[in-house]
């Protein structure tokens, strides 16, 4: 089944990347905290991937309309 997501605003991803920057974990974090950080980054990568697909589709559609 194909995934359908509502439009993802680039501003939202920018704000989320600011709030949850990619960084190396501290040696003092628990394993649970480490996996929580991995989950945050995985979600951001998922959203960025789909934002890129949205942008590619807009470009493809605008090219077809010309």
Image: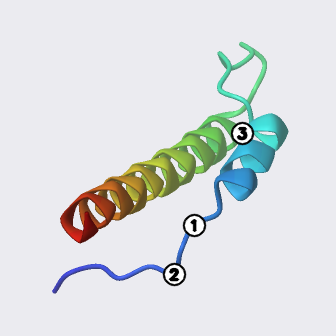
The image shows residue 46 at horizontal and vertical percentages of 44, 54
Q: Say left or right for 64 vs 36.
A: left
Name the quadrant of the C terminus. bottom left
Q: Are marks 3 and 1 in contact (CB under 8 Å)?
A: no
The CA span between labels 3 and 1 is: 14 Å
> Residue 16: horizontal and vertical position, in percent?
75, 48
Residue 26 locus on image (x, y percent) = 75, 16
Q: Earlier in the sequence, mark 3 or mark 1?
A: 1
Q: Secondary structure at mark 2?
A: loop
Q: Nearer the viewer, residue 65 or 14?
A: 65
| Residue at image mark 2 | 6
Crowding near the residue tagged with mark 2, few <14, some 14–19, many ≥20 C-alpha atoms within 10 Å: few
Q: Secondary structure at mark 1?
A: loop
Would you identify the image quadrant in which residue 9 lies? bottom right
Circles 1, 2 touching at the beta carbon (< 8 Å): yes
Q: Which mark is residue 8?
A: 1
Mark 1, Cα crowd under 10 Å, few <14 / some 14-19 / many 20+, is: some
Alpha-carbon distance for marks 1 and 2? 6 Å
Query: If you read the primary sequence from the N terminus, does the residue marked by circle 3 or circle 2 appear first?
Result: 2
Dot 3 corresponds to which residue? Answer: 17
| Residue most extreme to the front | 66
| Residue in the image at 62% along x and 48% along y | 40
Q: Quadrant of the N terminus?
A: bottom left
Q: Which of the pair 35/20 is nearer the observer?
A: 20
Does residue 3 sit above or below 34 in this rendering?
Answer: below
Q: Is residue 31 left or right of residue 26?
A: left
Instruction: Looking at the picture, tell me which residue is in the foreground, 14 or 1.
Output: 14
- Residue pictured at 65% horizontal, 40% vertical: 37
Secondary structure at numbered mark 3:
helix
Residue furthest to the bottom: 1
């Amino acid at each position: 089944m194909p995934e359908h997501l509502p439009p993802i605003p680039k501003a939202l991803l920018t704000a989320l990347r600011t709030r949850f920057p990619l960084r190396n974990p501290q040696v003092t974090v628990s394993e649970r905290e480490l996996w929580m950080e991995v989950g945050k980054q995985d979600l951001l990568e998922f959203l960025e991937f789909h934002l890129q697909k949205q942008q590619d589709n807009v470009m493809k559609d605008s090219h077809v309309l010309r």
